[in-house]
Amino acid sequence: MSHLITIQTLTSSDMESACQVFETSITNAFIQEGLGSLHEDIRDEIEHKKLMLHSALHPDNNKDSNVFFLLAKREDTVVGTISYGPCGEEIQECTNNQLNQIGELGSLYVLPEVQGQGIGSALIQALATELQSREITQFCLDSGYRTAQKKWQRKFGEPYAVAKNYWGEGTDHMVWLCEVKDFAAK
């Protein structure tokens, strides 16, 4: 049984497998947050990610064509995803548009059964290495999930911005600004 993980760019043959990662991981993230009953929000989030995958594959027919995805695969199955593209609405709102020129690391999802094995870190490193080759020096990322925020604070340090109670009482939204060179392969 090979546990070798490879990281590669999105191809159309990976679409279904990547969508499956979103289905499972996003649902799981909501449940972890105690938000498992928000079925509509979960669906919306999954659909939004599927649209992003689609636009990354077909850059010609839409304006978000500067979105790209990297996938972590075990044999032929996608087990993790990460994307890079223009910074999203929440980041713009939470930072008063201070980071609008900075691209966003997003869609970092790893299947629950393989979390904690370094796949997320490998995806971040591969993305940062790709950005470095494109002479991009910074990226931002955000999260409204408390579970993820704890992980990101360990990995990325203190957030650049915190929008208090953004998602309701006691649920903040955090934004980080990172230097690509700190995460790219040395």
Image (spheres, rainbow, N blue to C red):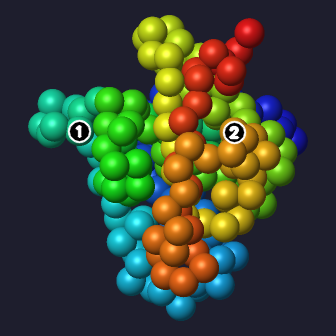
State the residue position of label 2: 156
**Where does the image place residue 22, in percent across and percent down from the top left?**
51, 60
Q: Quick one: 13 or 146, which is closer to the camera?
A: 146
Q: Quick one: 101 or 27, which is closer to the camera?
A: 101
Q: Is residue 158 above or below residue 173?
A: above
**Where does the image place residue 19, in percent across and percent down from the top left?**
46, 56
SS for callout 1: loop
Whole-Å distance between the Cαs marked 2 and 1? Answer: 26 Å
Position of 29 with respect to 114 (left or right) is left
Q: Could you tell me the amino acid type at mark 1? A: Asp
Q: Residue at x 69, y 39 (%)?
A: 156
Position of 145 with respect to 167 (left or right) is right
Lower sequence index among marks 2 and 1: 1
**Where does the image place residue 94, in percent across and percent down from the top left?**
41, 55
Which disc, if any, is residue 126?
Answer: none
State the residue position of label 1: 64
